Amino acid sequence: MPYYKFDRNDVFINTLKTYPSVKFVVYSGSAFYNNTPNIAGQFVDPIRLTDAGNISLYELNVDRLSSSTGKTIGPNVIPEQIIQDNGLIYPFVVKNGSRIDFRTSTEAAFNNSNYGDILLGVAYPYTSSISKEFYDTTTSRAASNPVAGGGYVSHLRALKNTINHYRYISPHFDYSSSALLRDFDNAQVGLVSIPSVFYGSQIKKGSIDLKYYYTGTLTSRAVDINRDGVLHSIYGEDSGSVIGVALYDEGFLILTGTTALNANNDTYKPATDNPKWIYFAQSVSGTITAPSSSYVMEMSGTSYTQTITMMAHARKGELNQSNNPTFAQYSTSDFATTGSKVYKEVTNRPIKNTVSSAYADPTGSFEKITYISKIGVYDKDRNLIGIAKMATPVKKTINRDFTFKIKVDI
């Protein structure tokens, strides 16, 4: 088998920038990602063990029922060490000298376990979806606990420095703005969180399109007109006003629009209220369903994919010999002669002539022909690292040369 080395002009590495579309439809406490429906399986419903608004990491545990199998893994001498198998795929490691453990486990729990014990991670599926938080004027943004010497900071307050970082773009990014007479610490604010798994490196600037429906009728629509992260209403009672800002790199929508979009009421919080942009996607916040309201959020992500392109050449006069038994003409004679003192292979086996002819006899003029069906890619130590297969074998004659373009995402 011949080997050829790629020249410097035969290998190219490029970065492909794409903008995948992202769409969420939120209604009655559920979110639907890119119009994906909830599908029932033979054993479980939904089939992926997660709602259609979620992405399931690795797509594991599809149509698997969680139930005892009667099997155990790991040590079974001490009763509390017996781990029951529930039929679902789950991550595990064996405690050994490498001290590998899961991030969800504590150091104390690891130290208390014995070498050889099975350590479990969180069961699959790992899921991710959008979330919504609503901050009313009285909702605490931060609190301290002097007794315990700690406290907490809300997600909105945690974004304070990030929001202020974009003040050079627009005053609407000011966390506490005297010009706008607004302070995020005591204003009504809606915070929509979008995990990066949905958009990649960043949300494409200017691609956000928000639609607010009430009983199926479009009530208002907001977009980023100037591609600066400031969301403007372009339809409805509040048309022309700013209803919030978008943090494209971080994946957050901060909604501040408090204008009533119509005179109707819906359950956006324990008390009913008029439809407002601060309640956008409120039905995925937990206990609130807002049965008369629905929302559509569309955007484009930004994804970078590195690709390597390799040019494999089959030049004239090369690669026209094959070790495939079908390359030689069929014969009933043996390939080799053996005896008590001799082993002799046939040295003059004729090559099969595959040149087509209009006549059965004579055949066309003889020509060495091979068919290229696979190309192997090797590393510097000649370890096979990849195989490129043709859809149909390519006919190679002595007078023909080919260049095969192999493209792989890396």
Image (tube, rainbow, N blue to C red):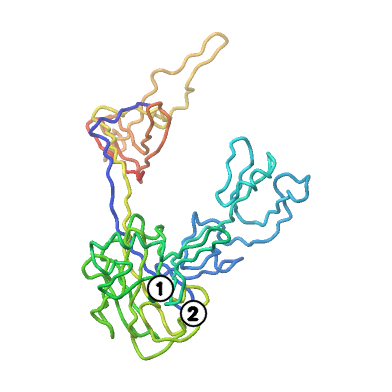
Instruction: Specify which label sits upstream in the sequence, 1 or 2.
Output: 1
Q: Position of residue 210 (x, y in %)?
A: 33, 74
The amino acid beneath tag 1 is Val
Q: Position of residue 40 (x, y in %)?
A: 55, 69
Name which residue lies at 52% across and 57% down.
126
Callout count = 2
Q: Residues within 10 Å of mark 2 (few under 14, many from 20)?
A: many
The amino acid beneath tag 2 is Thr
Q: Position of residue 362 (x, y in %)?
A: 28, 33
Q: Is residue 252 above or below residue 238?
A: above
Q: Residues within 10 Å of mark 1 (few under 14, many from 20)?
A: some
Name which residue lies at 63% across and 37% down.
96
Mark 1 lies on residue: 25
> Is 33 left or right of 407, judged from the image as shown?
right
SS class of the residue under badge 2?
Answer: loop
Name which residue lies at 32% across and 45% down.
306
- Residue extending farthest to the top is 341
> Mark number for residue 289?
2
Q: Is residue 76 above or below residue 152?
A: above
Q: Is residue 175 above or below residue 278?
A: above
Name which residue lies at 60% across and 60% down.
64
Tell me the quadrant of the picture where the N terminus can be found: top left
SS class of the residue under badge 1?
Answer: strand
